[in-house]
Amino acid sequence: MVKKCIYCSKELSQEEVIDVCQPCGFQVWGEKMYDAIRDNMKQANSDGDLYQGSVTDKPTESKVEPNPKFSQPTSSEPSQTENSEPIPTSNESAEIEIIHDSDKF
């Protein structure tokens, strides 16, 4: 599959880390920002982090360990919804107070 610039469809090298050619990148972001984006993406590619979350290419093996702080609660821990009030279903009625702007004056 040939890589192409997303703006002008110019063919790009397969090693290119950004799908934008240099002339289009300069027009979109300016020279300094384009170079910074490209340099950061090259660094991410060499670190193996470039395709994290990609839906178009096969992802590399994740180097990130799951954070136990954000793990699912165990059965002994209360869930966030246990102490909250139930949400009314379509068969239950709920009182709604309607305030019109004209009622304020």
Image (cartoon, helix red, strand yellow):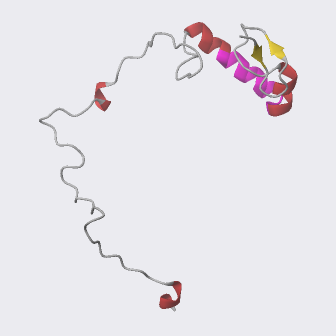
Residue 57: give x, y in percent of width and height: 58, 15
Q: How many marks?
A: 0
- Judge left or right: residue 70 versus residue 102: left
Residue 67: give x, y in percent of width and height: 34, 24
Residue 87: give x, y in percent of width and height: 27, 60
Q: Is residue 27 above or below residue 87?
A: above
- Judge left or right: residue 104 versus residue 88: right
Q: Quadrant of residue 46?
A: top right
The N terminus lies in quadrant = top right
Residue lying at the far bottom in this picture: please name it.
Answer: 105
Bounds of the magenta span? 29-41
Whether residue 57 appears in magenta in the rendering, the answer is: no
Residue 36: give x, y in percent of width and height: 73, 22
Please name the predominant secondary structure of the magenta segment in the image: helix
- Judge left or right: residue 1 versus residue 63: right
Q: Quadrant of residue 26?
A: top right
Q: Nearer the viewer, residue 93 or 8?
A: 93
Residue lying at the far left in this picture: please name it.
Answer: 76
Whether residue 38 appears in magenta in the rendering, the answer is: yes
Q: Nearer the viewer, residue 97 or 43?
A: 97
- Judge left or right: residue 57 versus residue 89: right
Q: Nearer the viewer, residue 6 or 101?
A: 6
Residue at position x 52%, y 23% from top? Answer: 53
Q: Is residue 74 above or below residue 16?
A: below
Residue at position x 37%, y 79% from top? Answer: 97
Q: Is residue 60 above or below residue 24?
A: above
Q: Quadrant of residue 58?
A: top right
